[in-house]
Amino acid sequence: MGKQNIFADLANCTGSAWGHTRWIADSCCGVGSIGLLCMMVAKAAGAGRLIAVDTSDYALRNASALGATHTVNPATEDARGRVYEIIPEGPDLVVEAAGPIEAVELMVALRRRGTKWNLFGITTHEKFELDGGVTHFMEGRMDASFGTTPLAMSKAIRLMETGLIDVEKVISHRFPLGRIDEALEVMAGPNRNKVIINP
């Protein structure tokens, strides 16, 4: 088991991260299992530069192994400055897949004119600010992801069938049900992606 457990996640990511075939650059804030899937979808869609942004070195190593062309750790460097060193014209798409409000604030700071930005990770009732004038003149597009659509599901199926995306690669641990306590400990720790518990 594995692919069946991750299919819905991939379909959600396909809806978030599949947009333009002309992608030049994508920046993903947060590269746990969802962020990795979003990044893999962006790569399959033709993104030339994929920047993984995360405070976990473990997550950044996984992102590099799965196709990120660059990694940025906001805990140790100026994330916006580093992204704009890599892409002086700014990212085409920014996906927030981390959850903390700081990731959302970074996503807002990374925008340039025309950037598409997607709220995926944050689910808490926290507020962030937008400068109305800047947002107006930047002509960006913001959306959010919660569910999926039949179109995104069919794209996800094609991505898996053709081998463009191997969802098994985001599984870091597998446990039988009898070891659920150990699985929960791993899930609470920093060095894991998708944890599968098999019955």
Image: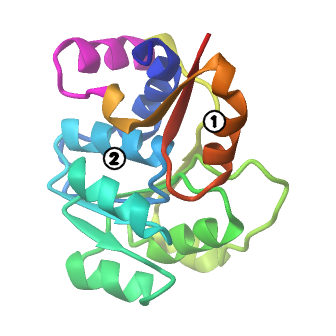
**Magenta segment includes 155:** yes
Q: Is residue 128 left or right of residue 102?
A: right
Residue plotted at (47% across, 42% down): 33
Which amino acid type is marked by label 1? Ala
| Residue 115 shows in this picture | no
Residue plotted at (39% across, 39% down): 37
> x and y percent of residue 161 in the render?
22, 11
Q: Nearer the viewer, residue 74 or 107?
A: 74
Give the farthest residue toward the right.
125
**Magenta segment includes 64:** no
Which amino acid type is marked by label 2? Met
Residue plotted at (49% across, 50% down): 32
Q: CA distance from mark 2 to mark 1?
A: 26 Å
The numbered dot on residue 39 is 2
Secondary structure character of the magenta stretch overall: helix
For disc 1, the marked residue is: 183
> x and y percent of residue 64 in the render?
24, 58
- Considering only order in the chain, which callout, 1 or 2, is on the residue closer to the N terminus? 2
- Reply above or below: 8 against 20: above
Q: What is the span of residues highlighted in magenta in the rendered image?
A: 151-166
> x and y percent of residue 158 in the render?
26, 13
Q: Nearer the viewer, residue 36 or 199?
A: 199
Quarter of the image with the N terminus in it: top left
Find residue 176 and report its image quarter: top right
Residue plotted at (33% across, 38% down): 19
Find residue 79 and report its image quarter: bottom left
The numbered dot on residue 93 is none
